[in-house]
Amino acid sequence: SNNLDRPYLPPEIRPQLLPQIPNPSRRTHTSQVFLFRSLFRSTSSEYCRSKENNRMFGRAPKKSDNTKYYEILGVPQNASQDDLKKAYRKAAIKNHPDKGGDPEKFKELAQAYEVLSDPEKREIYDQYGEDALKEGMGGGGGGHDPFDIFQSFFGGNPFGGGGGSSRGRRQRRGEDVIHPLKVSLEELYNGTSKKLSLSRNPDTVTGDIVFVLQQKEHPKFKRKGDDIFVEHTLSLTEALCGFQFILTHLDNRQLLIKSQPGEVVKPDQFKAINDEGMPMYQRPFMRGKLYIHFSVDFPDSLTADQCKALEAVLPARASIQMTDMELDECEETTLHDVNIEEEMRRKQSQEAYDEDEEMHGGAQRVQCAQQ
């Protein structure tokens, strides 16, 4: 069309493009016309951006590092304003000179936050880096006092009460608060959130809050380091012929536990399941083991027929190589049930009583001898 045949060209770039303009009378070169239109739009756009840059900086700025400020704050380049505020708040409090922080680091944090929190400055920094920002702003790239930025961010002096510069006086650091926190084994296994209300003195630099986790007793599971232990009782039939049961884990998952074909479980035997224990410290994707401690519930007695049936399938009894005469000479005994733990406690109490009697009796004998 006529508009494409005679486009408006800025004087500065007209000599560069005029040799490439096709002859308007030669309509056969349609592809050249479209090529020129694309070239014109691209070049014209670049020209406008160049003019804007020259207006701001006096010349087209050179690109430089545009990641440093994000690295200082520890945020990605697509961080939101809320992310920037959270990162600056945490890092600035940690590195504040009144809390023993590094003054240079504190200054860098303020400079990075000042630039990235301003949308216009951030856009310039993202496109051209720190050098272009310094040129466009007349040097410094953010020359405000870092303490002023800190105080304006927190709405005053967070380490003092009555105004005044935080540089002019040292604030007393408060003591650390040790807070015991009772948690269940389920909460340790799955994770949890707790709320805590504290009061603090505005005239002091706050100390740290140290949480001491105290695990509550669990009715079913026991924890030892990264491992979890659970007790399970089998019947004699299950121990000899195989078993299968469902175990509800701490996260309410249902675990199917079963023995191998032909496997016999002995009393007081342990079995382990890998990767079903507690999450490991600083290795959250690795877990300890789940140990199952088996006990076997034996029947109190058997009938004669049951004994014969068992003898038919179980290994033969151990035979005694003795004659009838030798057996007649042996003294026969009788076994009785006993609670071994109760027996041991009774013996210890008796021994302690006997020791007391000996001490008092000896003292009386010494007194008699002196008289």
Image (cartoon, grey):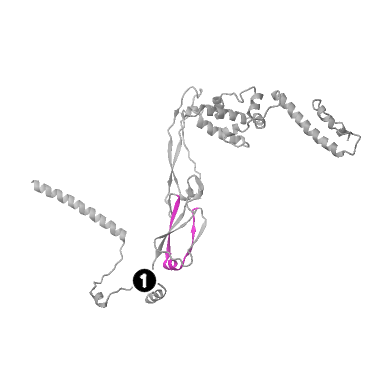
Task: Tell me where residue 99 appears, x and y as whole percent.
Answer: 47, 29
The residue furthest right is: 25
Task: Tell me where residue 87 appears, x and y as whole percent.
Answer: 56, 34
Q: Is residue 114 visible?
A: yes
* Magenta-colored stretch includes residue 241: yes
Task: Tell me where residue 231 appears, x and y as whole percent.
Answer: 42, 58
- The local secondary structure at tag 1 comes to loop
Q: Would you call the spot at circle 1 few (<14 residues within 10 Å), some (14-19), or many (20 or more)?
A: few
Q: How many marks?
A: 1
Q: Residue at x 13, y 49 (%)?
A: 364
Location of the N terminus by quadrant is top right
Quarter of the figure with residue 338: bottom left
The residue furthest front is: 19
Quarter of the figure with residue 233: bottom left
Chain part drawn in magenta: 226-250
* Magenta-colored stretch includes residue 139: no
Q: Is residue 220 visible?
A: no
The residue furthest left is: 371
Task: Tell me where residue 298 appears, x and y as whole percent.
Answer: 39, 67
> Is 353 displayed left or right of 232 in the figure?
left
Between 355 and 202, which is closer to the camera in this rendering? 355
Q: Vertically, is 335 above or below 60?
A: below
Q: Residue at x 63, y 22 (%)?
A: 139
Between 1 and 203, which is closer to the camera in this rendering? 1
Between 15 and 130, which is closer to the camera in this rendering? 15
> Is 188 displayed left or right of 366 in the figure?
right
Label 1 sits on what residue type? Ser
Q: Which residue is mark 1?
A: 301
